[in-house]
Amino acid sequence: MGYLSPPPAPAPVIVYKDVGGLVTDYEAATEQYRRENREVRLHECRSACTLALSLPNVCVYPDAQVKFHKAYNAITREADEGISSKLFASYPAAVQARLGYLTREYRVLSGRELIALGMRNCEGDNPVLIANRRQRQAPTAVASANPPPSAGGSGSWTDIASRVQTAVASAFATPQGPASGSVRVAVADRSRVTSDAVARSEPMTGLPKPALADIPLPPRRPPSEAFTAKDTTVGMAMISGSQPILSAKFLRVETR
């Protein structure tokens, strides 16, 4: 970005590399920046661009390079002493004293040298802005409840429920006032839960025995009568004209 090509106002004019040009053009731009109070930041600035040092809101980077020399006629290539004098007069007094005078050859001052002469440091005077996250507001109250009383302790579950309800209501309260609406806390009655659990764990009595328990089992057959001819008294009759597949000892013939 050059001295004559600024961004839209009020953004600062950052000069990365400007090799100069017609002095009249740079004089017009310098007066515009002066009226707008625009900040001009210099990296590399040559010739007519050095008019920027006359601005009240100008700064240089430590590694900047600012190069000075006499103005000259673009046609005859001869030095213009009148314009050169105006350029020199626009510089701060400390810079004039360091340069002494202008020549046709470049005389270079670094950003660190200019800062030592009183020019503003672009890095030192422009702190980096860091967005800070909004801190969370600490709760005004912490919900807490006393532990349930032991078997030999004092207190009741009704008192504990009341304390828990108060603590929860405080926790939901806002800095502007208490929480809107009512807060209900359900606390189980340990005595009822314990008695019911014990009752359910006791064995059940008084129930009738299963009906199957009254049905007598059939008498067991003696081993001597196992697989006798009695088992073959009922079977399947042969169909007329059929041929047996198995031998006779595997067949049972129905007797009528």
Image (spheres, helix red, strand yellow):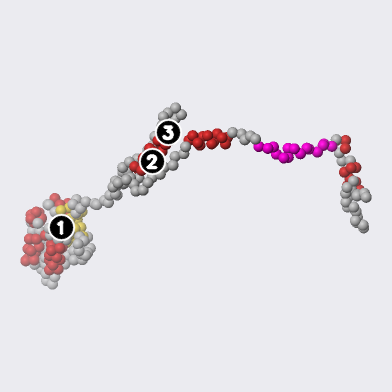
Q: Range of the magenta residues?
A: 207-221
Q: Earlier in the sequence, mark 3 or mark 2?
A: 3
Q: Which residue is mark 2?
A: 165
The reply to whether residue 30 is visible in this rendering is no
Q: Earlier in the sequence, mark 3 or mark 1?
A: 1
Task: State the image coordinates of residue 81 (x, y, percent, origin top left).
Answer: 7, 65
In the image, is residue 235 part of the stretch drawn in magenta? no
Check disc 1 and give the amino acid type: Val
Position of residue 156 relative to residue 134, above or below, is above
The foreground one among 187 and 55 is 187
In this picture, residue 201 sits left or right of residue 97: right
Q: Main secondary structure of the magenta part?
A: loop
The foreground one among 124 and 215 is 215
Q: What distance separates the C-alpha of mark 1 from that of mark 2? A: 66 Å
Residue at 88 percent across and 47 percent down: it is 234
Quadrant of the snapshot with the N terminus: bottom left
Crowd class of label 1 (few under 14; some 14 to 19; many from 20; radius 10 Å): many
Task: State the image coordinates of residue 67 (x, y, percent, origin top left).
Answer: 15, 59
Q: What distance separates the C-alpha of mark 3 from that of mark 2? A: 14 Å
Q: Seen from this angle, which residue lies furthest bottom?
A: 75
Q: Which residue is mark 3?
A: 156
Q: What distance separates the C-alpha of mark 3 from that of mark 1? A: 78 Å
Label number found at residue 58: 1
Residue at 9 percent across and 62 percent down: it is 87
Crowd class of label 3 (few under 14; some 14 to 19; many from 20; radius 10 Å): few
